[in-house]
Amino acid sequence: MSACPSAIPFGNLAAEYHPQVGGKCASLGTMMQVGLPVPPGFAVTTRVFVDAKEASGSKHRITEIVDGGLGPLSDITQEALESVAAQAREVVMTWEIPVEHATMIRQMYADLCAQSGVEDVPVAVRSSSTAEDSPEASFAGEHDTYLWVCGIDDVLEKIRCCWASLYTGRAIMYRHELGYDHNQVDMAVAVQKMVRPRAAGVAFTLDPTNGDRSGICIDAAWGFGEGVVSGDVTPDNFLIDKVMWTINRRTISPKTHAHLLTDVEGADCPQVSRVELPEDQVNAPSVTDEEIIAIARLARAAEKHYGCPQDIEWAVDDDLPAGEDTVLLQARPETVWSKRHRAVGAKADLVSSIVDTLVNPLSSRKGAERG
Amino acid sequence: MADRFSSPFDIEAPAGAEGWQNLYSYSAVFSEERRDYEDGGFWFHDGVHWPEALTPWDAGVFEVAIASLGQYNTRHYLVPPAYGVDFRILNGYVFLSPVPAPEADIEGRVPHFMERAGFYFANWDRLYDDWLVKVRCLVQQISELDFSPLPQMEDLEVITSGAGRGSGDRLLSTYHRLLDHVLTLWQYHFEFLNLGYAAYLDFFGFCKAAFPSIPDLAIAKMVAGVDVDLFKPDDHLKSLARLAVSSGVDDRFNGASPKEVWAALATDEQGQAWIAEWDKAAEPWFNFSTGSGFYHSDKIWIQNVEVPLGYITDYIVKVKEGVDLNRPIEALHTERDRVVSEYRELLASDEDRETFDAKLGLSRTVFPYVENHNFYVEHWAHSVIWRKMRELGEVLKAAGFLAETDDVFMFRRSELFDVLFDLYAGWSVGAPSRGPSYWPKEIERRHAVHEMLRGWSPPPALGIPPEVVTEPFTVMLWGITSDSVAAWLSSGEEGEEGVLSGFAASPGLVEGPARVIFSADQISEIQDGEILVAPLTAPSWAPIFGKIKATVTDVGGMMSHAAIVCREYGLPAVTGTAFGTKTIKTGQMLRVDGNTGKVTVLD
């Protein structure tokens, strides 16, 4: 294998490099290569992380802080955890990106700007650790993501912030609980052109309430999907049949707040913040029926590609023309129902089964779910 | 919300219809003698099959039909939880009440059901082939019944052959035979139907267990046939329209009366060839009722040629515009296969896939009967029965018993024995029958009562609803569920203003102006792009489905004709809204959501 490059555009991400780009980047690369509408960008590989760590000479310092600062699982207090996490992050933030890597990343970002026709194109800088998005553990939301990052200096800074987010309290705890070695987990980073979402959210390619694989469940809210993921806005919810493409359930929630792009005084770039919504948007559906079906089709395409139920993040990009404006931000395997067996196990003999149906009709059965 | 519907004993006769009870069998009306039983039950109005007030003779056919349904559940197959469906007539309208098997009997009925239903399922194709032969033979027998008038003098041949019996005997016994044939016809009707529904429900239940949110119509789509007999009459109209254009006789279809059109066609070879094609298609396919087939007054294409002729004339215009009238059979097959394979693939295990295949296979085996029987019984055989009864009506009219031929339907089924005997006796004796001085006045009275009944609208249900509606045939045949019962109980009390709910019977979302029609006679009022709102639709309305944008009906479930035809034509449909024709006015803008079963009045 040739040496892993510092950074690789999603469109060129060959499978041999997947171990060096983390779950999220690998998935973005695959999706782009199979034609799913993913915003363009590039992966900053773990080689950069590893080289920076080695160059800093503070690798053992981290081990001391984490392993020394935390005892057995049952003894860990919140205070101790946060203190250990803060110290570890502080150390990581002192790491410098080696010059040859920084040069490569600058080039990639410049290419992205050129491709988008925008100077200092706004990007999302996302953590992509080598442990996340495996079928056994989602690591969902354990690491940080930075939105609306503009200009190469800020991009390089936020890459280091993503590295540091390997050591948030919750990430340390999660690895601890699942028995991961802290030193074995490396961090790659996805740098991806920012979408300007009119609406965004998540979608599951099954009904998370009962594991029904014929359903696609969408949570949608105005603006950025961050509020849907973190749970600080109540999203609209839709259930779509993935064979008939009908919308079988729709719940329009009062969406008092949204994560929107706002101008910040003194800053070069606008920032995403949680703001109150005007009256007319609160109870209005955040997506149209056409968009709902487009999102569902996107989720289904990802599921068909990966061959197992998916949990995706999507957005409706205001910058793109209608009909092509639904984009996939990420896809990962669904982890809850995928672990369960959900067979019907009806009687094989047809006539006995008919007797069951007649004597115990569907309309009187409750909780037919089998785990 | 009320917890019960009105008692049948509290429903009064409409003004002017007092004494309506004697238009119907003594056993078919609510009565003091059975009050305890009747008052404690749940009775729903069957507007799917009998939307209008019945005339006395048509009511007789209704009684035979529903009794026969019960017979198969109760006595033939011993459907474990279900006896038959009890039936009453109130103010001329039909009310039904499913009768559960006693709890203690259910278990004992199971092995019998397994054996008996199992036999039919195992031999279905052969038995169904036999059925087609039986029913065609029966229709033949009915059409051969001889209701010619009583002669002034018997033919000499009656004497010389030593027959020893004559026309009077023939007339009386022919009527007996007609009634026997009606009974046999309805035995045949239910020979397969309940079993067919049971197999379908089993597949339905499996799909719901595997995919709790699967839309009902997805299940229907997997099972339903693409090329079913019920579509044949419409297919023939389209072929005839194409033939008219391709053979250059389309100019004869100028809106003139059938007689004039036929005369114009008869003038040349091409025209005669077209008539020959028509004749081939007409028997049996144009024995097609514009209604449910349960009313003698429903127009039948073959006897009201202006109806199919109008459709053909419309189709000719479309053919000349280059519109492709073919149903997209190939595409429908492909779509059905896609739906099946995608759900199948989503199942959790190979065992489930095996079960799915077996249940789907059985459902598809039984479904051709479910889909096709309606043409043979309600359309074809009934057309012939009404025709024969009119021949009898002619005889009675000529003898002065009736003012009009169709007055024959104002007699009760059994009453006609006496009437015919009166006619026969007068003819035999050579003295006046009582009928001519008795019946015309009585029939006039009955017409007046019936007219009052026609103007009355029946409540959707009577009596005490069951906690949950579980009886499978009630759900399947009539689309009655715990939800619909609750909706009836709360009608007018709650719910969004201007929003009606029903079955999401065919998907899609459209907006357009409403056209409310109450009977087949109003079909010609429908304009392109309108949304049809009707109590129910009949399969023979198919030609107008090319014009309309969506359908809303008062009655019917997922398998109602409106639902089947709309899915076929890719139009949204909401069925079983209960109050559609009462709430919506022609010209109002509607939004019909066939995905959710909601109809919204927009202005």
Image (spheres, coloured by chain):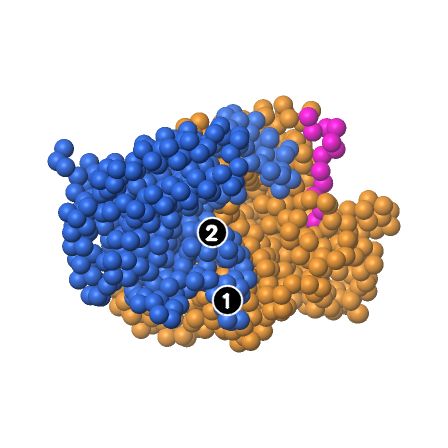
Chain colours: A blue, B orange
Displayed quadrant of residue B13: bottom right
The subunit carrying tag 1 is A
B572 or A82: which is nearer to us? A82
Crowding near pointer 1: few (<14 within 10 Å), some, many (20+)? few
First-in-chain label (1 vs 2): 2
B218 relative position to B429: left or right: left
Circle 1: residue type: Glu
B180 or A174: which is nearer to us? A174
Marks 1 and 2 belong to one chain: yes
Residue at the spot of label 1: A276
Residue A230's disc is 2
Where's the C terminus of chain B, which quadrant?
Answer: bottom right
Which residue lies most toward the right here?
B32
Label 1 element class: strand
Is residue B246 located in the magenta-colored stretch of the structure? no
**Label 1 to label 2: alpha-carbon separation:** 16 Å
Circle 2: residue type: Ser
B373 or A144: which is nearer to us? A144
Displayed quadrant of residue A364: top right
Can see residue B189? Answer: yes
What residue is at 64 percent from the left and 48 percent from the top? B481
B180 or B254: which is nearer to us? B254
Label 2 element class: helix
Magenta region: B96-107
Residue B505's disc is none
Instruction: Say if A361 sits above or below B580 in the image.
Output: above
The picture places residue B232, in percent across and down from the top left corner, at 41, 52
Is residue B99 located in the magenta-colored stretch of the structure? yes
